[in-house]
Image: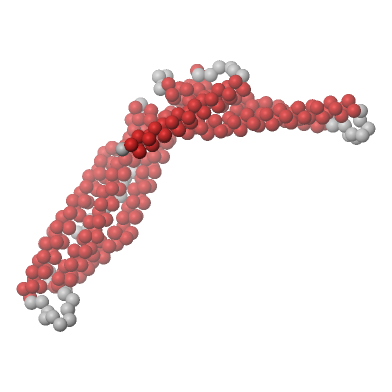
Amino acid sequence: MNLPAELVSLLQDEAYTVLCTESLVEALANLNREKEEILTTRPPFGMLASSQTRQIFQTSLRAALDNEVGLRNRLDQLGQIDLWLKAEIERTLTVYLPAISSDYRTCHDAAAVVGKWEEAITALHDLALGLARDARGVAAAINPVPVPNLPPPTPIVMEQSRQRALGNLRITVAAIQGGIAQVMEVRTEFTQLCDAQADGLQLPLPPDFRNLGWVDRLATLAGPQTTAEAVRCEAEARGFCSDGVKNLLRQAAEVRDACFDAGKAILATYWRQFRAHAQSHYVKERDVDEVIAELVQHRAASEAAIRQATFEAAKVASMR
């Protein structure tokens, strides 16, 4: 099995951690049985027992308790090392698996596409605000608010305001239709990327909003009908901005989580295979204390390297 050197080293450490833990757990179980046997030898009446008998009992019990403390301390060390190894192996596999598993790569590529879709949906928010504003502008042009001490606008002025408002609305509707097209393009990309592997997983559809045909029809309606249509359009656009975007982004987050969950399942499958291989090929019989000391050194060296890398990255960032 041709694995990266870093991954081999981590898998070897994990295999030794498992073996040492199993050995210590077995030793602790044996010690507990031994301790129970020692307790059965406790002198029934301490004052009547000989000093030698009491001494033997106390010495045996103290040795067993000391051994128990030592075993539990080693198990605690191994527990901390195991947590470190799990994080490091997962990180290393996350980098390595895209090169060997197309399914794993697809899962993470799909999650990235979800991010693009979220950006496209979020961009619709500002466009929808513009749609609400311009729809209100059409209604206001048809039903101007009286201004104190000024004569009402003439029919010519009102028609000019209506045409100007409709023109603004047309521009915004064209823009929002372009935004919807972009959302649908990313959605199609997600579908094509996942194909049958997605198991029916899909990104949600964006709202239809209004199209240019609707604006053309709006221009032919009578004043009250135009106003009613514009008011409905504004309400729909504002509803999208308040709740619609949140609901769509929540659904997209669920899709992304599903992609990551599928990737984690693939990673876990490879990990189990690599772990079995490591336990068969990367370890040999060794002294437990010697192995634990070596594992502690490996962990310390890894954490020191991470601190150094973080320091250097911060130093470079500060020089920019």
Q: Residue at x 91, y 30 (%)?
A: 49
Occupied quadrant, residue 100: top left
Depth order, front residue of 298/23? 298
Count of numbered badges drawn on the protein = 0
Residue 169 visible (yes or no): yes
* Residue at the far front in the pictured view: 319
Tell me where residue 195 appears, x and y as whole percent: 29, 38
Q: Residue at x 27, y 56 (%)?
A: 125
Q: Quadrant of the N terminus?
A: top left
99 left or right of 120?
A: right
Between 234 and 307, the one lying in front of the other is: 307
207 vs 319, nearest the viewer: 319
Q: Residue at x 29, y 59 (%)?
A: 241
Left or right: 77 in relation to 305: right
Image point (45%, 29%), residue name: 305
Task: Report the side of 129 relative to 264 (left or right).
Answer: left
As drawn, the residue found furthest toward the left would be 156
Image quarter hosting the C terminus: top left
Q: Position of residue 75 (x, y in %)?
A: 62, 30
